Image (cartoon, rainbow, N blue to C red):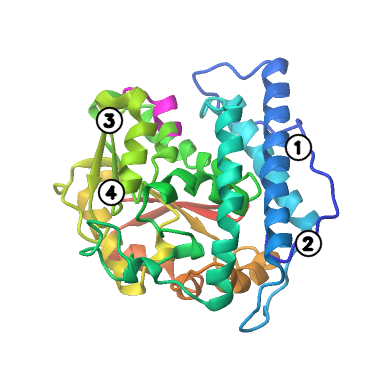
Amino acid sequence: MLGARPNRSIFIPMSTQPSPHTGPRPGPQIAQRLAYAASQSARVAWFFGQYMLAARLNGRTRLQRPPEGPVPDTRAILEELRALLARDLANIEAGYYRLPHDLVPDPRRILADAAAFFRDVPEVQRRRRDRIATEVRANPPPGSESLPAYYRQNFHFQTGGYLTEESARLYDHQVEVLFGGGADAMRRQTLVPIFEHLKTRRVADCRLLDVAAGTGRYLTFVKDNHPRLPVTALDLSAAYLREARRNLAPWARTSFAVQAAAEAMPLADDSQDIVTCIYLFHELPAKIRVQAAREMARVLKPGGILVFMDSLQYGDNPAMDGLLDLFPQAFHEPYYAHYARDDLDALFADAGFRPRTTSLAYMSKLLVLEKP
């Protein structure tokens, strides 16, 4: 949303083009559709408004180079977001997944998170202005000294990087502000291939691994739809894994946490039916991306699938290319520029994957790949 100008109101349409798939659950009735529209419209207004206010407080970002591609305005961004939410509702009505489990969020939590977010804005702006991105290396939290150097950075210029309890508590709110309230809806698009893969299998006998699981929020959507599916949250951050355990507490008997790097996973060969990887690769050096892809292929069973979501790349949606130029400048993302031009098809083919489908969802792309 960098460069967006606030010139349009926010309204999420209720009309959708239903999927031809007929799932096992009945579609929402009119009341449910109204509830979805009201909830998501309020969500977008809440987070998009915070983005605009934070941008105003931060002032103009000093660019090292101007964007080469077009930068969409607010109207274009909101049209993309409306399309995403219409697709999200169509998937719900088709039975791929349930209405969001937090359709009515806890007001105390969202107010507290917003207050914490704005308290941190001046510190984020200080790091952005002075190009400071390795504070967590200079003052490492206990236990983080042995983590890879590429990981010990203040990604997004956020306080604590990915290494502190405070960062873990605030992370999901920060991401929703960045995407104007569309982050969860983007992640939910990955639930469609998961549903398709599991519908002919005994769910309790399958295994799902979420690589770079972070706070575990994504896995709460997986578990809400497949409560008997055993899942493993793998992440490098002990603080984020503690937050994941809290978020996954309702499903504790079938949820597990492992602290490890994506490029060196302490899991057996051919042990997972599904591997998910959401917004990791743009934060990895190129060499580590290759190693992580091979590791994911190693732990997957033959016939298993990798469900991969990450940022758009150049040319995926040319109208958004300017945002790809701006993002790594406004938010500390040292490996993003290379990722945005990386050949993911070749990378995954070299790791042993066979492509199934590719699709775009707002500011993300979704790949579904199979281990033959």
Number of other residues with Cα within 10 Å of mark 2, as a class: few under 14, some 14 to 19, many 20 or more: some
Q: Which of 10 and 286 is in front in this view?
A: 10
Number of other residues with Cα within 10 Å of mark 4, as a class: few under 14, some 14 to 19, many 20 or more: many
Amino acid carrying label 4: it is Ala
Q: Which of 281 and 17 is in front in this view?
A: 281
Whole-number angstrom distance, CA of label 1 to CA of label 3? 34 Å
Whole-number angstrom distance, CA of label 3 to CA of label 4? 21 Å
- Span shown in magenta: 221-228
Q: Is residue 192 a member of the stretch shown in magenta?
A: no
Whole-number angstrom distance, CA of label 2 to CA of label 3? 42 Å
For marks 1 and 2, the one nearer the N-term is 1
Whole-number angstrom distance, CA of label 1 to CA of label 4? 38 Å
Question: Which residue corresponds to mark 1?
Answer: 12
Number of other residues with Cα within 10 Å of mark 3, as a class: few under 14, some 14 to 19, many 20 or more: many
Is 67 above or below relative to 73?
A: below
For marks 2 and 3, the one nearer the N-term is 2
Element class at badge 2: loop
Question: Which residue corresponds to mark 3?
Answer: 230
Question: Which residue corresponds to mark 4?
Answer: 238
Amino acid carrying label 1: it is Ile
